[in-house]
Image: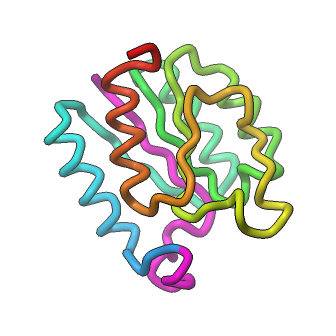
Amino acid sequence: MRIVVLNGVNLDALDRRDPAIYGGMTLSELETQIYQWANQIGCTVRCRQTNHEGEFVDWCHDALDWADGVVVNPGAWGHYSWAIHDAAELFTVSVVEVHLSNIDEREEWRRFSVLEGLVDARIVGKGPEGYREALEFLVKGPDK
């Protein structure tokens, strides 16, 4: 199984953000952990991160041709980017939305997701472990 992990805006600065909320891990450390989990679970992963919304959309389009599953953490874009909604709407494979922090218990504006209704699962507030849970979900399949 081939899975793309798409991380959005500001995730390249994880280690500079509030560690009480985001955990203090660098993006490189997070990606290394994701690759290790993928190896243990038995899937192949490609991690990508950008601060440019158009590039994020391009990567969604690229994944249409090869990915068997998608993990997406759009960061703040998930609360207002209809361009990302429209790109994610094209997926015919399972999609899991992940947020390191529990956005349901943070500021009101963070509680809305443009991906609502498009994703097969939403994992929030579990830190890096949320990515492992997302990979496991995709490998098992949404109906298992």
Which residue does the image show at 49% across and 83% down from the upper left? 19
User: Which of the 4 quarters of the picture holds residue 5?
Assistant: top left
Which residue does the image show at 28% across and 23% down from the upper left? 1
State the colouring used for the structure image: rainbow
Magenta stretch: includes residue 38 = no
Q: Can you say which quadrant of the picture contains the C terminus?
A: top left
- The magenta-colored residue range is 1-21
Magenta stretch: includes residue 13 = yes
User: Which of the 4 quarters of the picture holds residue 99?
Assistant: bottom right
Task: Compare residues 44 and 126 and report the one nearer the observer.
Answer: 126
Residue 114 is situated, as x and y percent measured from the top left of the image, at 78, 41
Residue 120 is situated, as x and y percent measured from the top left of the image, at 57, 26
Q: Is residue 26 left or right of residue 94?
A: left
Task: Compare residues 56 and 20 and report the one nearer the observer.
Answer: 20
Residue 33 is situated, as x and y percent measured from the top left of the image, at 25, 58
Q: Is residue 70 left or right of residue 58?
A: left
Residue 78 is situated, as x and y percent measured from the top left of the image, at 72, 49
Which residue does the image show at 30% across and 39% down from the upper left? 45
Task: Compare residues 36 and 64 and report the one nearer the observer.
Answer: 36
Which residue does the image show at 60% across and 37% down from the upper left? 58
The mark tally for this picture is: 0
Q: Is residue 88 left or right of residue 92?
A: right
- Residue 102 to residue 62: above or below: below
